[in-house]
Amino acid sequence: MNTYSRFPLVLEKGEGAFVYSSDGKKYLDFVAGIAANSLGHAHEKLVAALSEQVTQLIHVSNLYWNKPAVELASRLVKNSPFDKAFFCNSGAEAIEGCLKLARINASKSGTGRFGIVAMKNSFHGRTFAAVRATGQLKYQEGFAPHFPGISHAEFNDLASLESSVDASTCAILIEPVQGEGGIRPATKEFLEGARKICDRDGISLIFDEVQCGVGRTGKFFAFENYGVVPDAIALAKGLGGGVPIGAVLAVKDLAKAFEPGNHASTFGGNALSAAAGNVVTQELWENGLLEHVAKVGEFLTQKLSGLKEKYPAVLDNRGIGLLQGIELSVPAAPIIAECIEKGLLLVNAGTNVIRFVPPLIVTEDEISQGIEILESALEKI
Ligand SMILES: Cc1ncc(COP(=O)(O)O)c(C=O)c1O
């Protein structure tokens, strides 16, 4: 269906941080499937694990256990403040899972609470509840009547959050770094304040780390940059290195609200996607990839902050690790088109922001190559 405005480009194969189009042209890929291909393309260990897994089992449903899913859940729990995992297939589905968990927890505790306070300018996905939680009206137009019980506070504004939470609220939903909304990191004060409100009122703090989680900021969870721990978190995108998987992780007091029959997904945590998740999480936690992201992320930050002095059209640079953006005084689209022409794939985050989400395995040399192409496009405006 006519849901996408695609670039006139057919991508056929990839290797590391590069992809090749059907006409043989080579591109440096700073989009990485929109922050999903965490290990780049054709990563040796991912290819080996998936190839092996398809010879054993792809899918059996959640009527039974499968070893890769148990291994992934165990690693996620062992390395985090969370106690339980629920697997699904996408970011929107992980958000739905978090919201359903918060509501059923409030319902089972008999609080009478049901409301979700999300943030303006946020993005949480395209399903009915997720798109309603998304704090940008353009994504909701034409889909009324909207999913009920969701309101919005100003991002990074504690007074606004405080006044949006009332006796009906059961959860606060925040992206620690807003992605689609223009690569805007939360302030530490804001996340700490949200945590305090949730503790005071006995409600759930939910972080959407679909884009900013799974190593993208140089820490496995973006919230580790802030020292603020939520009660539940939504993960997806990078967790499968390009294979569709989503996850809800939650602390036990909240997770226990789900009992058999309350929530489910046919494909969630199937053997193939979990095998992919195992490679990604091993690379990050056990094989030094997190440290690599922190280092090259610093390098990317330096390169991007240097652009402001050189090009008047570059107003700002923001982000953490390998989730970065530059804000322009002009639309991003023509510059992105020029970069594609010159062999660099980039994606916008809102009209005036160019987003940088290369694969986590990107090298400093590849970042320098990308910035050189970007500069040659910026010189033309
Ligand atoms: C922060 C955030 N949450 C949720 C989603 C929705 O994820 P999906 O497209 O996998 O449903 C996205 C997608 O861009 C996202 O960036």
Image (cartoon, rainbow, N blue to C red):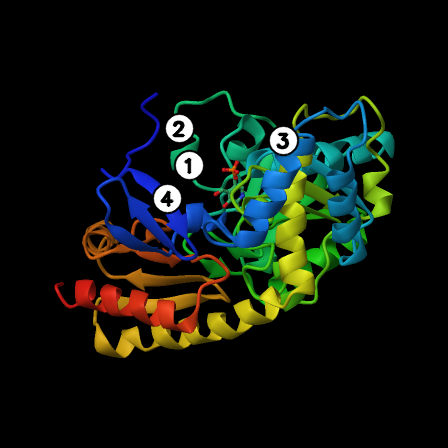
Label 4 sits on what residue type?
Lys
Alpha-carbon distance for marks 2 and 4?
36 Å
Q: Is mark 3 on a helix, strand or loop?
A: loop
N-terminal of the pair, mark 2 or mark 4, is 4
**Do callouts 4 and 3 mark residues in contact (Cβ within 8 Å)?**
no
Q: Nearer the viewer, mark 2 or mark 4?
A: 4
Residue ID for mark 3: 149
N-terminal of the pair, mark 4 or mark 1, is 4
Q: Eyeballing the image, is 19 above or below 312?
A: above
Alpha-carbon distance for marks 1 and 3?
16 Å
Q: How crowded is mark 3: few (under 14 residues within 10 Å), some or many (20 or more)?
A: some
Q: Nearer the viewer, residue 306 or 135?
A: 306
Q: What element carries label 2?
A: loop
**Do callouts 1 and 3 mark residues in contact (Cβ within 8 Å)?**
no
Percent from the top left, x then y, of residue 140? Answer: 44, 30
- Kindly give the residue lying farthest to the left in the view shown: 380
Q: Nearer the viewer, mark 4 or mark 1?
A: 4
Label 3 sits on what residue type?
Gly
Q: How crowded is mark 1: few (under 14 residues within 10 Å), some or many (20 or more)?
A: few
Residue ID for mark 2: 141
Label 2 sits on what residue type?
Glu
Q: Is residue 283 left or right of residue 357?
A: right
Question: Do we see residue 240 in this rendering?
Answer: yes
Residue ID for mark 1: 137
